[in-house]
Amino acid sequence: MSAVSVSSRLNKGLRQHYLALPQGDLCQVTYVWIDGTGEGLRSKTQTLEREPQGIEDIPEWNFDGSSTGQARGSNSDMYLVPVRMFRDPFTLDPNKLVLCEVLKDNRLPAEHNLRSACSKAMEEVQDLHIWFGMEQEYTLLALDEHPYSWPQGGFPKPQGPYYCAVGADRAFGRDIVECHYKACLYAGVKISGANAEVMPSQWEFQVGPCEGIEIGDQLWMARYLLHRICEDFGVIATLDPKPMTGDWNGAGCHTNVSTEAMRAEGGLRHIEEAIEKLGRRHRYHIRRYDPHGGQDNKRRLTGLHETSSIHEFTVGLANRGASIRIPRQVGQDGRGYFEDRRPAANCDPYAVTEAIVRTCILGETGEEELSE
């Protein structure tokens, strides 16, 4: 049997008694931020005297950056600046979750605060009403980091019967997926779907469409909810782009892009122009599409398992083995959106969407070599 955490076996019914206690007019606000890895999430909670009605009602706070890989111990205080508020699906109304930017002591963005630069880029193109949708793939692991429900030290049957499947021998961890979906809806996260993926114990949820900077905010909070729910169930959700070597699919974060012009009559021309620009900056985008400059994605983008090679830029109609896919319906309608299939599951959505805006809309040029 797959290993699960000891804390997941605590009496959840007893916990419900305390969560149901009245709290008067007081409100718990949990601050959530990205840590010094650029991938991990941290959180802590404080009490406000009343329920905040908007983000402006939530005060700035601080934390010990030396314990999150973001500061030295001799100068460890970092600012938490609230940027987007959500309902709390764990302690319920009136309590809140708030996503925060991290600032250094000089009020400049911390090293892994990529939201600040992304927000400036989105402001420059706000008149074009650019929409993003992101498809977050992830894999459930037991505490021994072997995929959840896989035979101990072994492997399940080969890929084929697991994608969008039902059945106890094909779908593993659906309780987590359904709880996450409902938690996102309650919180106000713009989740738009979920499905089982090709590798057993791998799943996907979709966020969007969202305009501009909001897609990054929404996806980061959706990730927080996923990790928090997996904590309750005693399993791990990994965003590793290739959690299992061999004949198994990796995990991506496919990104759908559409401007107002692309959605209008004749929009396919604008889609093709954007894709042409992306092709001229392939290496630049690969460097921005995972937290380690392409090294994580190198394990995934092999040209196999529904990927294009990391060294090639390819385009295809309804082709899931291409760098960029134009959906069949878009080809028929002559307008809509395109899908960039290169971002890794552990990408920073702020980095991905900023790069797309800078290349496709702001017209920036120039390449960067892949590190060896």
Image (spheres, helix red, strand yellow):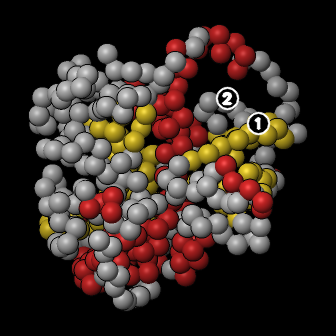
Distance from Cα at disc 2 to Cα at disc 1? 8 Å
Q: Residue furthest right?
A: 49
For the N terminus, which image quadrant? Answer: top left
Image location (x, y in percent) of residue 185: 52, 39
Name the quadrant containing residue 358. Answer: bottom left
Residue pictured at 41% horizontal, 88% vertical: 364
Residue 221 point in image, percent of width and height = 55, 48
Image disc number at residue 249: none
Q: Is residue 288 left or right of residue 103?
A: left
**Does the residue at mark 2 contact the one at mark 1 (Cβ under 8 Å)?**
yes
The image shows a total of numbered marks equal to 2
The amino acid on which the numbered mark 1 sits, given as a three-letter code, is Gln
User: Quick one: 124 or 335, which is closer to the camera?
Assistant: 124
Relative to 268, does residue 173 appear above or below in the rendering?
above
Mark before the other along the chain sequence, 2 or 1:
1
- Which image quadrant: the C terminus? bottom left
Question: In this image, 246 relative to 138: left or right?
Answer: left
Give the labeled residue for mark 2: 91
Q: Is residue 215 left or right of residue 238?
A: right
Residue furthest front as drawn: 74
Give me the residue at 40% from left, 42% from top: 238
> Is residue 241 in view?
yes
Quickly name the residue at label 1: 28
Badge 2: how crowded within 10 Å, few (<14), some, or many (20+)? some
90, 63: nearer the viewer = 63
Q: Amino acid at mark 2?
A: Thr
> Could you tell me residue 249's position as x and y percent?
20, 46
